[in-house]
Amino acid sequence: MIRITAPELDIAVLVLGMLILLAEAFASKVDKRAFVFAAIAGLALVLVASFFVAPSPSASHATAFWSFYAGDRLAIFFKQFALVTTIFVLIMMVDYAPVLRASFPSGVPQEGLGELVALPLFTCAGLMYLVSAIDFVFIFVSLELVTVSFYVLVSFTRRNPITLEAGMKYLVLSALSTAFLVYGIAWIFGTTGQTNLYRLTAALASTGTESGAALLGMVFVLVALGFKIAAVPFQIWVPDVYQGAPTPVTAYLSVGSKAAGFVVLMRVLQPFMNLPQTQRLIVAIALLTLIYGNLAALPQTNLKRLLAYSSIAHAGYLLIGVVCFDVRAITFYLVAYLLMTLLSFAVLILVAQQTGEEISDFDGLAGRSPFLAFAMLIGMVSLAGVPFTAGFLGKFYIFYAAVLQRQIALVVVGVITVGCGFYYYLKVVRAMYWQSSSNVQNIPVNILSRIAITALIVGTIWLGVYPQPILEALKH
């Protein structure tokens, strides 16, 4: 029996991206949609193979060469998370192809679609490396692979001035966050002499280590990671980038980048959690993120901007889990967030091509397309936290962990802001089911998209009723 290792999964995705990029460059007469289906099939094979990877007993016992890489259960689970996210994003690319065609008015059919398929594969490989990174140098390299891919993806339809503005803002602010990361790593290495996170724990426990200087380095690293997870006050790029980027890329940023950012955040903070200043700092950031994200979402009329501020708000709920350092609660919330966010963006792509991205463009959707209206209903109520959806249980486990840790301020603010979420999420539901529209044209949904949307609906409801598979996933 062939034994599959965790690094081989990452390499397989990287090679798949290179092959599709080369094929796209030389096979000019091939239908570009074939590359989308080839990428989906390849990622599906890697996903199946990932279930046969045996996790390493402990990353701290890795060999000298692999001391920067963790193949533990957490890493393997989030590799599968990245693969599933990328598969759904590629399915969205098929629906987004008409918009892409309008952005490349050269007369060449499906121009740009091949590159738009290859880049998410490189991003996926970077995310898979990132969740296994247990050394600051490897974290930096993996993060740059993800970020450089997103630079191109965000500004891909560059003839659109809104997209070009989004790409420039993401480029400049992301470069600034990278500078903070490198500066923080330099402080930590200069203080402890270590870049490996497991050795860093022992170094910080040593009485000869200057904890204040190491803590300063951690703050700089936290600034960089705060940018990736869209935490306040590092969230300034989110609304404009989410609105200007191609919608499948926005979905990928919202789900994939955020999940990997939180895994890295948990690994990086673990050596510093014994310092009381660390927890107080994370509590302050969580409170600011909860309040700002939810209040800023209230007046939004554009659905992509609403989902952008919603992303900031959900980062606040996840930071509550980080304060309590409850890995299972954070993992379940991220899976729930994947399902309900991708579901919302999948419907948005289809509706926006006929009407637009404003909430008012969803008026009367229940009459035009009952299937898409029901899918968006499930996505919105789950994001709001209605019972019997994955979003409700995600918030429940986060708040339960906070209650056990006696984080009363976080629980009180979290519960109040959930009430704000009900208002702005249900605005979309009201538009679909209670507002009338003169547009009675049906919205076509292809078979692949219908299957994907149905799977996301089923997953959102199923995990809201039976969460055990995710809760048990990290135990073995």
Image: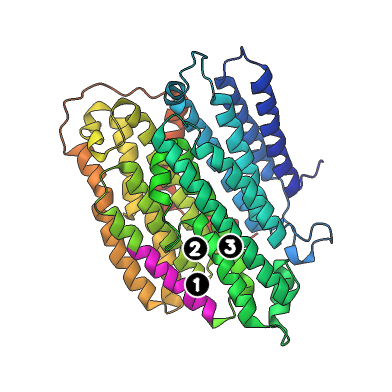
Residue 212 placed where, x, y %? 61, 81
Instruction: Say what secondary structure mark 2 lies in.
Output: helix
In the image, what residue occupies the spot 50% across and 57% down? 227
Say if residue 179 shows up in the picture: yes
Residue 443 placed where, x, y %? 32, 24
Residue 287 highlighted magenta (yes or no):
yes
In the image, what residue occupies the spot 63% across and 57% down? 74
Mark 2–mark 3 distance (CA, rounded to whole Å) = 29 Å
Residue 100 placed where, x, y %? 46, 25
Whether residue 12 sits left or right of residue 270 in the image: it is right
Residue 206 versus residue 72 in the image, above or below = below
Whether residue 232 sits left or right of residue 211 in the image: it is left
Farthest residue to the bottom: give it.
207
Mark 2–mark 1 distance (CA, rounded to whole Å) = 9 Å
CB atoms of marks 1 and 3 within 8 Å: no
The amino acid on which the numbered mark 3 sits, given as a three-letter code, is: Phe
- Residue 202 quadrant: bottom right
Q: Residues within 10 Å of mark 3 (few under 14, many from 20)?
A: many
In the image, what residue occupies the spot 46% across and 36% down? 248
Q: Looking at the rendering, in which quadrant would you find the N terminus?
A: top right
Mark 1 or mark 3, which has the lower sequence index?
A: 3
Residue named by callout 1 = 324
Magenta segment: 277-291
Q: Which of the two residues, 466 or 189, is positioned nearer the viewer here?
A: 189
Residue named by callout 3 = 180
The amino acid on which the numbered mark 1 sits, given as a three-letter code, is: Cys
In the image, what residue occupies the spot 38% across and 58% down? 313
CB atoms of marks 2 and 1 within 8 Å: yes
Q: Nearer the viewer, mark 1 or mark 3?
A: 3
- Residue 138 quadrant: bottom right
Residue named by callout 2 = 329
Q: Looking at the rendering, in which quadrant would you find the C terminus?
A: bottom right
